[in-house]
Amino acid sequence: MTAVAQQSTILLLAGRNRRAKVTLSGLTALLLIVTVVAVCSGAVPIAPAQVTAILLQPLGIHVPWDFEAQQQTVVMGLRLPRIILGICVGAALAVAGATLQGLFRNPLADPALIGVSGGAALAAVGFIVLGQEIALAAPMLLRSYLLPVFAFCGGLIAVLLVYRIGTVNGRSLILTMLLAGIAINAICNAMMGFLIFVSDDQQLRDLTFWTMGSLSRNTWRLVLPVLPFLLIPLISLPFLARAMNAYVLGESEAGHLGYDIERLKKAAILLTTLAIGTAVALTGIIAFVGLVVPHLVRLLMGADHRYLFPGSILLGAALMLAADIISRTIVAPAELPIGVVTSCIGGPFFLWLLMNKRMLRAF
């Protein structure tokens, strides 16, 4: 390579890095703006100045903006845990989708691909329809945790089956795992259909709302104990960025560069399972976040996982909060399932990507 070509390559990479950093700054600002709108919007409107006063009061800092006790209860008891849950779930689904798309080298890969969502949904539906005796026998303190625990265990079992089927002689076969995930999802959907068929009217209402996703399970008592299960993959997955950059070139190329491919696969599957299983257990199935967000980030910043992972985290969190704002205000005082909103946003956008063929060029 000539000196001129080397200099051109360096300048091109520097330009891409600057663009990525500027885009990450813009996504951070977008998340902050959406967070402010989310905490101020709702059935009880609260001005940003009043929100500031409410948040500063526990710290002993008094500001000249008055607020009512009802507003303080709404912000501290309802909206803050809901916003934190939305940020973590949106970020987890988006970064899990980006990881799976790189792992399978497939632009259509999403969090439902390896069976986590199907297994979690089946376990949750089974608990709603058949688990009343278990709920009544459990201590009152643990009853609110039973549904997410069952959902998480269902997702974990589904992934273990997919991983076991896709592992031959100690080596993970990505294509086999992909097909196994599709088969597991089909089985789970069939069993859910039967459970829905035998459910009563009240159970049908619960199932419909849960399978379309919701952030309404938003109490501190439920959110705080499970936050570590979302934060672990959010913090850990970006450390796999360099290995993922090598992996998308091919397994043999990544091995020649010194990366342990089998360890990378296991770490990626374990962390994405933890992220998706916990998210589905808390909020139900929320479509398109893990599929569309990574594509949009690639269009903005390129396919470098060093920027793709943090960009997906920021944009996924912002999109989830924006969808939640719409879901709880557009039909107030009722609440629209958030999965309906994300599908209305993600479906047309994904079709636009396909029609313009920019998705495949950006991958």
Image (cartoon, helix red, strand yellow):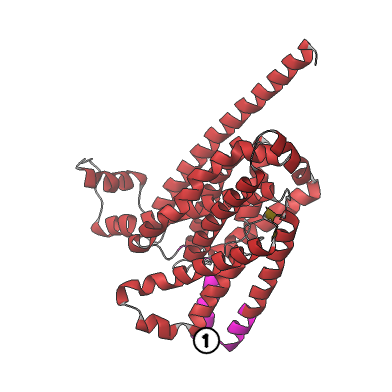
Circle 1 is placed at which residue position?
201
Q: Residue at x 60, y 67 (%)?
A: 158
Which secondary structure type mostly characterizes the magenta part of the structure? helix
Kind of element beneath mark 1:
helix
In the image, residue 167 lies at what x, y percent?
A: 68, 59
196 over 178 or under it: above or below: below
Q: Is residue 310 visible?
A: no
65 vs 317, nearest the viewer: 317
- In the displayed structure image, the side of residue 40 where residue 261 appears, left or right: right
The quadrant of the rendering that contains the N terminus is top right
Category of crowding for the residue at label 1, using alpha-carbon neighbours closer than 10 angstroms: few (below 14), some (14–19), many (at least 20): few
164 over 268 or under it: above or below: below
In the image, residue 40 lies at what x, y percent?
A: 39, 51
Amino acid under label 1? Asp
Q: Which residues are magenta?
A: 192-215
Is 195 a magenta residue? yes
The quadrant of the rendering that contains the C terminus is top right
Q: Residue at x 41, y 54 (%)?
A: 227
Is 140 a magenta residue? no
In the image, residue 110 lies at what x, y percent?
A: 65, 56
- What residue occupies the far top of the structure in this picture? 3
